[in-house]
Image (spheres, rainbow, N blue to C red):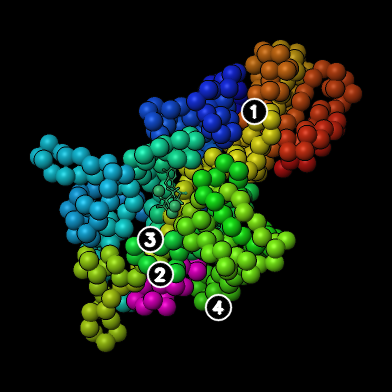
Amino acid sequence: MRLSRYFLPVLKENPSEAQIVSHRLMLRAGMIKQQSAGIYSWLPLGFKVLRKIENIVHQEQARAGHIPMQMPTLQSADLWRESGRYDGYGEEMLRMQDRHGRDMLFSPTAEELFTDVFRAHVNSYKDLPLTLYQIQWKFRDEIRPRFGVMRGREFYMKDGYTFDLTKEDALHAYNRHLVSYLRTYERMGLQAIPMRADSGPIGGDNTHEFLVLAETGESEVFYDREITDLKFGDRQIDYDNVEQCQAVLEEFTSRYARTDETHDEALFNEVPEERRRVARGIEVGQIFYFGTKYSEAMGATVQGPDGKPGEVHMGSHGIGVSRLLGAIIEASHDENGIIWPEGVTPFHVGIVNLKQGDDEADAACDALYQSFTAAGLEPLYDDRKERAGGKFATMDLIGLPWRITVGPRGLKNGVVELTCRRTGASEELPPEQAVQKII
Ligand code: ATP
Ligand code: MG
Ligand code: MG
Ligand code: MG
């Protein structure tokens, strides 16, 4: 992409409404524009990163054998009356009526819809296990939308639903999700720690939230420092293998790690004092086994091996796709701007032409552009007639992992400058070698 033809409305000034760094940087980098409280337009740069994150989620879901589909954003209130949640859900639910006076709502979550599809089309235990998921816009009328996309009212969420014949099978589905989420977050350059969470009125132990440690996080968290040494890495997992998934769950959840909602001071005190940590975290996902709550209320059963109707054990598993942009920036930035992890960067490399209009510099930039494109990478070429300082500031702000600076003086010696955004380290080298370092 040539910057002169792109739409990147960066802001010079710090927007006064932004209280935390990720919100400030997303506005300054021209990624989002607020339309009303907690509702945003996704400008091209923000949209590009959102798509990258979404793609990673899809790829990791596919690896775990989960099936994507799409539900409507608007639901009929009748389904929620059936499950018994309509009246109790409260003011976070955006309710409306159509022209016939029928009660509708904008989906805050979709247990009812998925259970409805399931009961309409799945009749036999032979069709289980089944995991269906979507990535779709949700609406929750948060009392205090704030921090940009971190706590929006309209937000983009991956929500998956598991259907199994027994509790045992459903717990495997739960473990499978935990494993796939660990991989998913790591690919985005994040450490998201599974923490024992509160299952609320439904009860039970089987729910974990994934938290990214950050000072601006809304949850207070208590954990054993050892947990931050754990890495999932590129280990190969057979997602059908019950023991393997269980072992990963045990590895990642055996140490103390809880949010304020489930914190137990006495248990925490059993952790050696030098390893006890109290910090803040951003909830980027949650997994949940809730048994037959919805299947029973909505009459979803399957014919069991004995020919009799059998119950269906369910779970739901969410990732805050749009919140992740904020979480990644909170975890990865400096005073000059964002530092995108390679896995989610909107462009792989920035090309800065110090003397636009100079034949040699233009040709060298064009050649670099071609090389990257041919290698399947996306360069962002700042081909505007702007001062170098302004070009550097924009590149630092939008946080591409690499910058190549091209100018007549360097080209005389056959070199360009390659700069790593994260370390700030620069080196001069021939253009072909700079390309080789990045691809
Ligand atoms: P929170 O505690 O932050 O209100 P939640 O527990 O109500 O979140 P879940 O129902 O668990 O949210 O939804 C799954 C994921 O969706 C959350 O882990 C979070 O990452 C994301 N999410 C929830 N609410 C919002 C919101 N208002 N804006 C952006 N993302 C959200
Ligand atoms: Mg909430
Ligand atoms: Mg929560
Ligand atoms: Mg939650």
- Asked whether mark 2 and ligand 4 are closer than 8 Å, the reply comes as no
Whether label 4 touches label 1, CB < 8 Å: no
Answer whether residue 83 is magenta in the image.
no
Q: Earlier in the sequence, mark 4 or mark 1?
A: 4
Whether label 2 touches label 3, CB < 8 Å: no
Q: From the image, which quarter does the C terminus lie in?
A: top right
Q: Earlier in the sequence, mark 4 or mark 2?
A: 2
Q: Which residue matches tag 2?
A: 204
Q: Which one is in front in this view, the residue at disc 1 or the one at disc 3?
A: 3
Q: Secondary structure at mark 2?
A: loop
Secondary structure mainly formed by the magenta segment: helix
> Residue 200's mark?
3
Measuring 40% from the left and 37% from the top, which residue is drawn there?
A: 144
Going by the numbered disc 4, the residue's amino acid type is Glu
Q: Which one is in front in this view, the residue at disc 4 or the one at disc 3?
A: 3
Q: Is residue 234 visible?
A: no
Q: Which one is in front in this view, the residue at disc 4 or the one at disc 2?
A: 2
Measuring 58% from the left and 68% from the top, which residue is drawn there?
A: 267
Q: Nearer the viewer, residue 369 or 346?
A: 346
Horizontal side of 252 relative to 46 (left or right) equals right
| Numbered range of the magenta stretch | 162-176
> Residue 243's mark?
4
Q: Secondary structure at mark 3?
A: helix
Going by the numbered disc 1, the residue's amino acid type is Leu
> Residue 397's mark?
1
Going by the numbered disc 3, the residue's amino acid type is Gly
